[in-house]
Image (cartoon, rainbow, N blue to C red):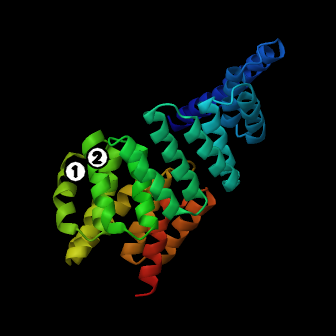
Amino acid sequence: MFSVLFFVTLGSHALSHHDTKALIEQLTKRINSGESTAENYYRRAIEYRVLGRLKEAKNDLRIALQRNENFILARREITRILSKQGQHKLAILSAEKVITTATTQREKSSAMILLARMLLNAGEPLEAIKYSSTAFKLNPNGKLEWYLLHARLLGELKRDNERPEILRKGYQLTGSIVLRNAWIDSLLECKKYETALPIIEKELISSRLKSSWKLRRAKAYIGIGKINDAMNDLRMCLKELDQRIHPKKPDMTLIADRGMVNALLGNIEAAKNDLSHLIHIGAEKWVTIHLNKAISLMENQ
């Protein structure tokens, strides 16, 4: 059964790449036959980006902007590519241009978030949070990714005690499970164990896959001194994670959870192996930062 699923997945992946290349060919024919519009260059740039061909994508986006300098979607896309390529100053300038190009309050607030993200990528969280705060003033309801970004910026600025409230507000307004989980994690990080525990217990009752919630409960138990209960949760969590992590296509978040479980159990070498694996497969800082801290803390005890 697994081999069948593997080849189906592999086939669909290859097909999607084939479709992308076919679409690039179609758009190229249109452009060469006289339909060299900003929209066609933008559409081809998106397909190039999907294939990881950022140089070609950037060239097409520049042409699209030459044809229509107010093409806000193209401006946003080239901003992200510049940042991904490490051209942070150009990315920031491009994001600022998105703000000046925006014509509605909704567009401006979204552009503020884009600039905040570019500033964070450039290592300027203090400047970035000014723009994410302004975005919420322009659009108080915000979006899921806005709340996550703002909370991350608060963390970067060592203002951790402010993180639970922004995430709780986001969860209440959006109903997002992602924000709910981030809110609970922030409560644990701020040592608000008694507040987090009832929510965790409720989720454990209703969840089929329990490892992430058992890990959260173990952290809360450690925080209130119920060490034996925490160790039991961690051992059960480790057993489930070992069964769920695919050896060839592992999920980054599951590896990070297993690394954290191992660190809390005192299995430091196993935790380090998971951390190294995450770094090797390109995990971003937000995926590894808590595991890194946990390993350092356990080693220094």
**Is residue 289 positioned above or below 44 on the image?**
below
Q: How many residues crowd mark 1 within 10 Å: few (<14), some (14–19), many (20+)?
A: some
**Real-space Cα separation, disc 2 to disc 1, in angstroms:** 15 Å
Residue sitting at 38 percent across and 46 percent down?
136
| Left or right, residue 156 beside residue 201 | right
Which disc number belongs to residue 203?
1
Q: Is residue 178 visible?
A: yes
In terms of secondary structure, where does tag 1 sit?
Answer: helix
Q: Nearer the viewer, mark 2 or mark 1?
A: 2
- According to the image, label 2 marks what residue? 171
Amino acid carrying label 1: it is Glu
Q: Position of residue 173 (x, y in %)?
A: 27, 41
Q: Position of residue 56 (x, y in %)?
A: 78, 36
**Is residue 295 positioned above or below 276 on the image?**
below
Q: 18 and 101: which one is in front?
A: 101
Amino acid carrying label 2: it is Tyr
**Is residue 161 positioned above or below 43 on the image?**
below
Q: Position of residue 50 (x, y in %)?
A: 66, 35
Quadrant of the image containing the C terminus: bottom left
**Is residue 82 positioned above or below 238 on the image?**
above
Of the numbered discs 2 and 1, the one sitting upstream in the chain is: 2
In terms of secondary structure, where does tag 2 sit?
Answer: helix
Q: How many residues crowd mark 2 within 10 Å: few (<14), some (14–19), many (20+)?
A: many
| Left or right, residue 188 beside residue 242 | left
Tag 2–tag 1 contact (CB < 8 Å): no
Q: Position of residue 65 (x, y in %)?
A: 71, 31
